[in-house]
Amino acid sequence: MCLAVIAKILQIEGVTAEASFGGVRRRISLQLLPEAQVGDYVLVHTGFAIAVVDPAEAEATLALLAEVRGEDAP
């Protein structure tokens, strides 16, 4: 089974980026998605951004996940 998670790109340096996963910051690779830009929501699988996600869809998904966890939406 494969799992990809939504992250928001905060900063880009070459082919890597700093991204936020619900407040946790991690470095990810943009080698498979060089068109990604700061502020984009992306799907990340095994440290690689694999798709840009529509902002409204990403925010709705993140809000639902927060609701399931019993937290306030981001």
Image (spheres, rainbow, N blue to C red):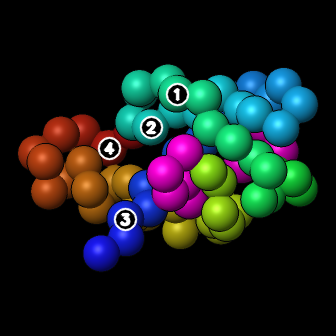
Q: Is residue 68 left or right of residue 3?
A: left
Q: Which of marks 4 and 3 is in front?
A: 3
Q: Which of marks 4 and 1 is nearer the N terminus?
A: 1
Cβ atoms at labels 4 and 3 below 8 Å apart: no
Q: Which of marks 4 and 2 is in front?
A: 2
- Disc 4 and disc 3: Cα gap in Å? 22 Å
Q: What element carries label 3?
A: loop
Is residue 39 in the magenta section? yes
Along the line of sight, which residue is nearer the eye, 18 or 73?
A: 18
Q: What residue type is labelled 4?
A: Ala
- Disc 1 and disc 2: Cα gap in Å? 8 Å
- Crowd around label 1: few <14 · some 14–19 · many ≥20 (10 Å): some
The tag on residue 57 is none
Name, please, the residue furthest toward the bottom.
Answer: 1
Query: Which residue is located at x 83 percent, y 45 percent?
Result: 37
Q: What residue type is labelled 3?
A: Leu
| Residue marked by disc 2 | 21
Q: Nearer the viewer, mark 4 or mark 1?
A: 1
User: Residue 22 appears at what percent x and percent y?
Assistant: 39, 36
The tag on residue 3 is 3
Cβ atoms at labels 1 and 2 below 8 Å apart: yes
Cβ atoms at labels 1 and 3 below 8 Å apart: no
| Residue marked by disc 4 | 73
- Crowd around label 3: few <14 · some 14–19 · many ≥20 (10 Å): few
Q: Give the range drawn in magenta.
A: 37-47
Q: What element carries label 2?
A: strand
